[in-house]
Image (cartoon, rainbow, N blue to C red):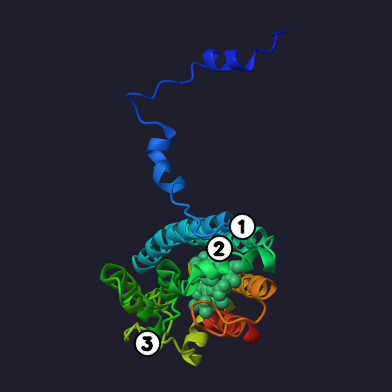
Amino acid sequence: MNTPSKPEDIVREERAQLDFSKSMSYGDYLCLEQVLGAQKPLSPAHDEMLFIIQHQTSELWMKLMLHELRAATAAVAADHLPEAFKMLARVSKIMEQLVHAWDVLATMTPPEYSALRPYLGPSSGFQSWQYRCIEFSLGNKNAAMLKPHAHAPARLAEVEAAFHAPSLYDEALRLLARRGIAVPASHLERDWSQVYVADAGVEAAWLQVYRNPQAHWELYQLGEELTDLEDAFRLWRFRHVTTVERVIGFKRGTGGTGGVSYLRKMLDVVLFPEIWTLRTSL
Ligand code: HEM
Ligand SMILES: N[C@@H](CC(=O)c1ccccc1NC=O)C(=O)O
């Protein structure tokens, strides 16, 4: 039987690379100096580190979500459905990850948050441009949401691009039409920056798919990927409201809204309306 090696011997025996004076290391590749040097608490409050890291990690996941969403939307537009499914499944999993992340933040009590809140000034998640790009990419268009970015032209241009572009759902409807399903012309070419309005003709189109999945398997699968995604997004919105209510009650938000009252209104947003309403007719 082999005698177990001592920890320091394992490193030598395995011939792990130990000298990075001339080659790229883990930290170099991941730019960890920048990432781990970007937590700059403004208050003496212990919990500010949690608050900052929670938001920074959320923004990183949102960055990946946008990367996947943009590529998935392009894949749908190019009729590359298997690729789109892979990416959309990843987006839903990221959203689930963000839903669970609320559990960490919810360990922060009202007195703990009150110690750092005065240092936040008027800053708020309302001003997250990546979040707004995600909402726009998923079809929740609202011109008023461009205003918080007016002071930063490059950023505004990015959010505006998402505002004017067809959403994932718009591209899904165009795909249905290309596959021979009757979709109202009003939904195939329009001003994509306008608020999406649910339509009986679009519901009829999805019903054709859902009444005969075998004949339209890819479209059926796309419908269910969209359902997974909106389901996860609804859970995220819900955990946001409940976490906010347990931490600040019904105080106004630092971003200027009514706080919980505003976030509750956002629970009524439906991204892919006909995907849900069609179920009543099946
Ligand atoms: C203690 C923690 C939190 C509190 C008290 C809180 C509170 C609020 C409030 C009151 C609003 C409404 C806008 C305003 O008037 O400020 C808001 C919006 C928002 N928050 Fe939070 N939030 C918290 C954590 C988070 C986290 C972890 C994220 C993740 C990135 C986040 C992302 C957002 C986003 C994206 C909006 C805009 C939502 C929309 O317009 O639909 N928040 N938050
Ligand atoms: N709107 C929050 C503040 C807030 O949550 C926040 C502030 C700065 C950076 C991110 C934030 N998170 C989400 O809104 C509040 O009213 O307490």
Disc 1 is placed on an element classified as: loop
Task: Name the residue at 38% across, 38% down.
Answer: 29
Residue 36 sits above or below residue 20 on the image: below
Residue 219 x/y as whole percent: 49, 70
Mark 2 or mark 1: whose residue is earlier in sequence: 1
* Residue furthest out toward the front: 44
Q: Are marks 1 and 3 in contact (CB under 8 Å)?
A: no
Instruction: Indicate the amino acid at tag 2.
Output: Met
Write down which quadrant ligand 1 falls in. bottom right
Q: Is mark 2 within 8 Å of ligand 1?
A: no
What is the distance, in whole Å, between disc 2 and disc 1 at their CAs?
24 Å
Residue 102 x/y as whole percent: 63, 63
Which residue is denoted by mark 1 in the rendering? 47
Q: Are marks 2 and 1 in contact (CB under 8 Å)?
A: no
Return the residue nearer the eye: 225 or 235.
235
Disc 3 is placed on an element classified as: loop
166 left or right of 99 in image:
left
Which residue is denoted by mark 2 in the rendering? 95
Decide: few, some or many residues near mark 1? Use Cα within 10 Å; few <14, some 14-19, many ≥20: some
Which residue is denoted by mark 3 in the rendering? 194
